[in-house]
Image: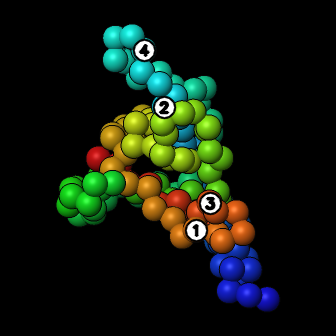
Amino acid sequence: MGLADIVRSGIALAKEVTSDLQVDVSHEAWISNDSYGKRVYAAAVTLSGIVEKKERLIRDFAGVVVVSKTKITILQPVTANGATGRREPIDPRDRITPPDGVTGPILNAEGMIDSSTGAPYMFEIYLG
């Protein structure tokens, strides 16, 4: 068993053990802008995640230090949308809404890459 298999198994175990802490989170993938510059989103997809409301300093997608108010941990890969011009699978223009309905801009989405799939094993998504 290689290290990648251990990481996959560990994340699967974490997902199982924390199932009672996870809540449904809505992910609407940005797909384009309309002729007025307004963002157009794909249909919402429900993801299970651990939502933590806590202010912390993080680096955003551009490397600038900013304040994040919410961290959402998704203990599984997120499917890419496939729209042109997106950062996949989580684009800063996407909309992610936790159960309380309080959302903010996506400041960063991080995850260690699985070499067999090229996608992160899991995600930590920071909202402003």
Determine whether 51 is above or below 12 in the image: above
* Residue at the image point whose x is 48% and y is 31% from the top: 30
Q: Which tag, 3 or 2, sits closer to the chain's start?
A: 2
Query: What is the secondary structure assignment of the residue under circle 1?
Result: loop
| Residues tagged 1 and 3 counted as in contact (Cβ below 8 A) | yes
Disc 1 to disc 3, C-alpha distance: 5 Å
Quadrant of residue 49 in the image? bottom right
Disc 2: which residue:
30
* Residue at the image point whose x is 33% and y is 50% from the top: 107
Q: Residue 51: image x %, image y %? A: 46, 54
Quadrant of residue 18 in the image? bottom right
Give the total number of marks visible in the rendering.
Answer: 4
Q: Is residue 7 left or right of residue 38?
A: right
Given the image, on which type of amino acid does mark 4 rest? Asp
Disc 1 to disc 4, C-alpha distance: 33 Å
Disc 3 to disc 2, C-alpha distance: 19 Å
Disc 1: which residue:
113
Q: Which tag, 1 or 4, sits closer to the chain's start?
A: 4
Given the image, on which type of amino acid does mark 2 rest? Trp
Disc 4: which residue:
34
Determine whether 100 is above or below 60 in the image: above
